Structure formats: C-alpha cells, structure tokens
Amino acid sequence: MHNMAIPAATAAMAAREQGKFWEFHDLIFAEVDLRALTNEKLEDMAKKLGLDLEKFKKDIEDPATVEKVRNDFEEARRIGVNATPTIYVNGRRLKKENSLENIQELIDKALKDLNIFKDN
C-alpha cells in the first residue's frame, strides 16, 4: 500500500459516478511510479477524462464514498490483501505471478473442485 492508495481509490469511485471508473483506473495504473502520485495528478486525470471537476471534488468528499473505500481497505487488510491486483477465484488466492497461465490454473482447480465436468 502506498500513501496515495486511499485517495486514488476514492478518486476512482468519484470518477465512477460520472461513468468513467475504468478509464480513471487505467490512467492511475499507467502512472510509472504510484508512490509519486499526488492529489494534483488525480485532478489532472479527471480533467483529461473530461469529468465535471466540481462534481468530482464533491464526490471525493462524499461521506458515503469515503466510507465505502475505507470499508473495502479494512476488508482487504483483514483477508491479507496488500497489493493491487490481488486475484481470488472462489475464495482461493492466486499466490503466483499474475500471468494468464497461473490464473487459468487457478480457474481450472476451482472448476475441478466444483465437479461440474464430472462423468456420469
């Protein structure tokens, strides 16, 4: 977790209110060094996406948004998530590199556990 994790998540939720969550998400993760992220850079990202800045700033301060983000972070800490992305499939955490092959292996294990392809 970096010092801007909560402000970045809150800003992404504010962007969601204008239908731009994924676009905002992509801009955040295009940032070379997330530790160098600032509130000014987050606002610049909102401008770049053409968001209504007044609404964006209001939504960042909205107590419901702040509470949602804080609750998500607390749950993440409780279950041991300490990085983004962290991938779970049916409650099983991917502990290897987030490669397509490793994700597929985790999905295959989950499907096998479900026995949905069981021979009759």
Image (spheres, rainbow, N blue to C red):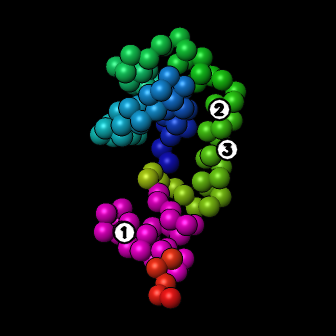
Q: Residues within 10 Å of mark 3 (few under 14, many from 20)?
A: few
- Residue hosting label 2: 66
N-term-proximal mark, 2 vs 3: 2
Say which label, 2 or 1, has the lower sequence index: 2
Which residue is located at x 50 percent, y 48 percent? 1
Q: Indicate whether residue 105 is drawn in magenta.
A: yes
Residue under pointer 1: 104
Mark 1: secondary structure? helix
**Residue that carries the numbered disc 3 in the rendered image:** 71
Picture layout, residue 8 above or below residue 98: above
Nearer-N-terminus badge (3/1):
3
Image: 117 above or below 33? below
Q: Where is residue 73 in the image (x, y as percent from the top left)?
A: 61, 47
The residue range painted magenta reads: 86-115
The kind of secondary structure element at disc 2 is helix
Residue 7 in sight: no
**Marks 2 and 3 in Cβ contact (< 8 Å):** no
In this rendering, which labeled residue sits more in front, label 2 or label 1?
A: 1
Q: Residue at x 58, y 61 (%)?
A: 80
Q: Looking at the picture, which amino acid does disc 2 mark?
A: Val
